[in-house]
Image (cartoon, rainbow, N blue to C red):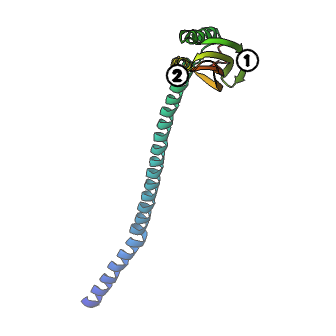
Amino acid sequence: MSSGVKKIIFFLVLIGILYIGYQYMIKPANRHLAEARQRTEEKIDKLEQFERASSAAQDLGQQLQTLEESIAFFESKLPSSVEIDKVLQDVTVIAQRQGLSSRTFQTLDRSNNSGYIEQPLKMELEGDFHSFYSFLLQLEQLPRIMKISQLDLQKSRHEEGQISADFIVSIFFQHGRI
């Protein structure tokens, strides 16, 4: 065999070894590396989803805490039934301080709602309009949750500036604290 044929055979064997090495070593290693990258990317995506969910859960926890604080604040504004007499006394004292005379003061039927009770009171007051307005402003300043409904104001025919007010004031208190 001549040296040229030996070189060609050596070159073909070398190419064969490269081809076999590529097919059985490099190609599987590249495939394994691509699969490992894909698994890593999937894990990174899951980790990002978990971080977003964790962040959302922390936000929900903060919102829940804010809501609990709000509920506690409003519950502090709801008196127990023992304190209802004090609230009624406060309303009466405010009306008297403003020089309003009470024609009617009647307790209406309670309505039970989920978590609280509404106690409506029908009131009829007479007096000066400005005094009634001051009465409403002071009533608003009381540290309790109240609502005025069915307000009917009538102007006096006999005296200028005098009115008759017929309304319902509702006082709210906690259901469990009766």
Residue under the image location 64 percent in, 21 percent down = 157
Q: Position of residue 16 (x, y in %)?
A: 37, 78
Question: Separation of disc 2 and disc 1 at Cα?
Answer: 27 Å
Between disc 2 and disc 1, the foreground one is 1
Q: At which x and y percent is residue 107?
A: 71, 14
Residue to which mark 1 is pinned:
108
Is the C terminus in the top left, top right, bottom left or bottom right quadrant? Answer: top right
Residue 143 seen by the camera: no
Q: Can residue 148 be seen?
A: yes
| Type of the residue with mark 2 | Phe
The one of 57 and 66 positioned closer to us in this rendering: 66
Q: Which mark is residue 173?
A: none
| Quadrant of the snapshot with the N terminus | bottom left
- Which one is nearer the viewer's eye here, 113 or 166? 166
Q: How many marks?
A: 2
Residue 124 quadrant = top right
At which x and y percent is residue 139? 55, 18
- Residue at image coords 38%, 68%: 26
Earlier sequence position, callout 2 versus callout 1: 2
**Relative image position of residue 161 (x, y in whole percent):** 56, 21
Q: Which residue is found at the position 41% from the left and 64% from the top?
A: 29
Please give left or right for residue 151 compared with residue 161 in the image. right
> Cβ–Cβ below 8 Å for labels 2 and 1?
no
- Disc 2, SS: helix
Question: Residue tagged by mark 2?
Answer: 73
- Element under disc 1: loop
User: How many residues crowd around disc 1 within 10 Å: few (fewer than 14), some, or many (20 or more)?
Assistant: few
Q: Residue 167 sits in which quadrant?
A: top right
